[in-house]
Image: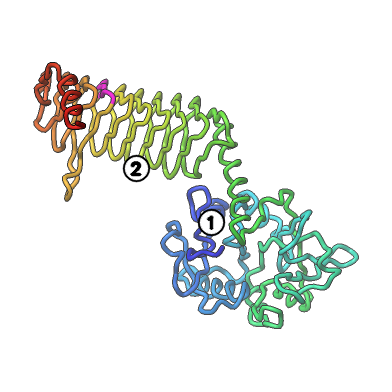
Amino acid sequence: MLSRTPKVLHDLCGQPMVVWPVRAALMSGAGRVVVVDSPERALQAVLPAGVELAVQPVADGTGGAVRAAIDQLDAGADAPDAESPVLVLSGDVPLLAAEQIAALAEAHRASGAAATIVTSVLEDPTGYGRVVRDGEGRVLRIVETKRPGDASESELQIREVNAGIYAFDGEALRAALPQLTSANAQRELYLPQALDVLRADGQAIAAHVLDDPTAMLGVNDRVALAHVRKLAQREIHRRHMLAGVEIVDPDATTIEIDVEIGADTTIEPFTTIKGSTRIGRGCTIKHSYLVDCVLEDGVSVGPFAYLRPAATLREGAKAGTFVEIKNSELGEGAKVPHLSYIGDADVGDATNLGAGTITANYDGQRKHRTKIGKRVHGGVDTAFVAPVTVGDDAYTAAGSVVTDDVPDGALAVARAQQANVEAYAERRRARLHSEEK
């Protein structure tokens, strides 16, 4: 990845890559989920509640990683029965779905094998370990291809590949792990060697073929990450559209995985919706950027609006063209139509704030809150200098800088008295002409 960020912590549609298989495992019904990390424990902060962390002391390969995970499982107070199946997923294979994990577990139980590997047939198998079968189609071994010399030329021609996803009989896996060796080009412990150990012991190895090869796509560089992100985004869009959301141009729309959108909402092109944003039914979002905000039913946003974290728009509210809102609430039917910034504010129901409205919420040391009541009519180019409270049914005159509270029903006029200087342009021209001489 050529990055200071660990590979599996790179973002994939709103979640670190490693969280995708973890969440899929949890959704599939796994009894315990253990994630293997380096001694730096870089992954610990992103793991969902209930997920355990195992430390692999030395980066000695996939075999060493699984050994660390087994040690963690066995050390737990609710250590599994030795015969319980153990599924092994890869943190850089993020598109495997919960249904596919459950299908693997079921296939493994039905096979009666000591191990079941997930495979797929790829047009271009470059970079993947190859699945070698005997004349009767039984799995013989997995041949790695990471370094020259790992595989022969004939083995490199095989298109069936190892997805790096396994189901093991727990007791068989525990017996095989101590027998792994580092006799390979990378001098690492390869987990697929456990299959050789089991087979030499007379135990069966089964294969579970994925019909959808995209589910096993791995990420080893930013090109692959972009490809996987495109596939993940397509599935997110598909899920929303099947639930009744109108995404006018999916190729020009970004929606992260945890976003919720109600039916009959329209998302117009060049919109980005991120984080835990929740959007109700019947909303319209036009060419805008939304992050960790809440939009209730019938809300209208954009074009070119920016809703930042903790922005809440109640039913029927509007944030219009070039409007930025953060940590604020617009009441039902409230409108901020044009060219405004609303920060750290509470805006009441049916209030309309004119173009160029600003809440001056920061005094250089602390943030302060602006409270604007119901049915307020804000004149254009009004600045509310917080902390300030504007009562219900109040008005502000255009161009006002409101620094004091405004009572209910009052008109606030806070601007300098206009003075017109007659014949100013003529006198100015005469002065400039005199100076040129």
For the image shown, how many numbered marks are present on the structure? 2
Q: Is residue 395 left or right of residue 211?
A: left
Q: Nearer the viewer, residue 402 or 11?
A: 402
Q: Nearer the viewer, residue 173 or 277?
A: 277
Label 1 secondary element: loop
The residue under the point 70% across, 79% down is 185
Q: Position of residue 103 (x, y in %)?
A: 67, 52
Question: Could you say which quadrant of the image residue 159 lies in?
Answer: bottom right
For mark 1, does the 10 Å Cα neighbourhood hold few (<14), some (14 to 19), or many (20 or more) residues? Answer: many
Task: Name the residue type under label 2.
Answer: Pro
Q: Is residue 324 left or right of residue 238?
A: left
Quadrant location of the N terminus in the rendered image: bottom right
Secondary structure predominantly adopted by residues drawn in magenta: loop
Q: Which mark is residue 309?
A: 2
Task: Name the residue type under label 1.
Answer: Met
Q: Which mark is residue 17?
A: 1
Q: Position of residue 124 (x, y in %)?
A: 77, 56
The residue under the point 32% across, 29% down is 339
Q: Residue furthest right?
A: 135
> Residues in magenta?
349-355
Q: Position of residue 431 (x, y in %)?
A: 16, 27
